[in-house]
Every structure is written in structure tokens, then in C-alpha cells.
Amino acid sequence: MSNGECEMMRLCKVAHKRKEQMVNETPLLFVGMKIETDYVLEKEYVVITLKEGGEKRGVEFIENDSTFFTVAKARRYVDILRRGLYLGIVVPERSFDLVLGLKSMLRNQELRNPAFFVYDEAGNVKTV
């Protein structure tokens, strides 16, 4: 099994745990929403899409160390926020320092604040 395959398995595990967390820990936030998961294998990240009545309400990106802190991804995050959608960004705990920089940059855009989460080696997700 290649490193890329191992990484995707880890990200899929995190996505599964995050979906369970959405439903079990904050069910009122997601009442009536359909939670879909898209696995973007060639890019090594996972997207959880939140839909209500067939309409997209938000997305969460389950990222690895190298996928979340790029110019292209920052532009995508800003675009999502400008459309008034919920945005969640889930990154490895070891990347927390980079999250602070991204958090500051996105909040300076005068847009809706994204939600940030970190996951540990076991795939457990925590709010930051």
C-alpha cells in the first residue's frame, strides 16, 4: 500500500468520525440536512457536503498537512464564505500553528467565520 493510499484511509476515517460527531454531538445544527461525503483521491482530501432540500448549505474539508494551506485552497475557502455557506476546515493537530495564520487571514476578509477543527493520530476531531 502506498503512502497516498494510507493517507486517504486516514482521511476517510477522520471524515467518518466527523460525520458521526455532527449527528451525535450537534444534531440540532444538522436537522433536515443530508450529509454527503466526496473522496477526492487525486488531491488527497475529503469533502463533506451539507445539503438541505437539495440545496448546498455548507462544506467541510478534511485536509492533510499539504492540502489546506495553499493559495488555491484559500481562494476556494473565501469563495465558499462569500456565497454565505458554512465552511468547516479539519486539519491535522500537528498543523495547528498554520491554522492560526489561515484563521487570521480568513477573518480579515470580513466574511462569515469558518469553523476550524483538528484531528489527532487516532482520527479524533476537536474544535479549535
Image (cartoon, rainbow, N blue to C red):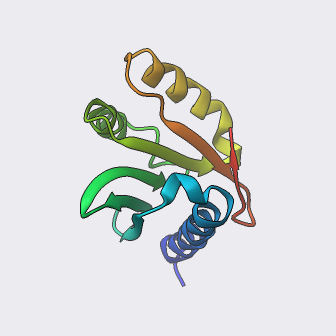
Look at 43% across and 43% down and name the residue there: 87
Judge whether 7 appears above or below 108 on screen.
Answer: below
Q: What residue is rendered at 33% in x and 59% in y?
A: 52
Q: Report the front residue among 41 and 33.
A: 33
- Residue closest to the eye, 2 or 6: 6
Q: Is 48 situated left or right of 89 in this image? A: left
Asked which quadrant contains residue 25, the reply is: bottom right
The quadrant holding residue 15 is bottom right
Q: Does 122 sit above or below residue 117? A: below
Give the tally of numbered discs: 0
From the top left corner, tell me how far across and down residue 93 is, in percent.
70, 47
Q: Say left or right for 41 vs 114.
A: left
Residue 35 vertical placement versus 59 (above, below):
below
* Residue 40 visible from this viewpoint: no
Q: Is residue 91 above or below residue 128?
A: below
The quadrant holding residue 121 is: bottom right
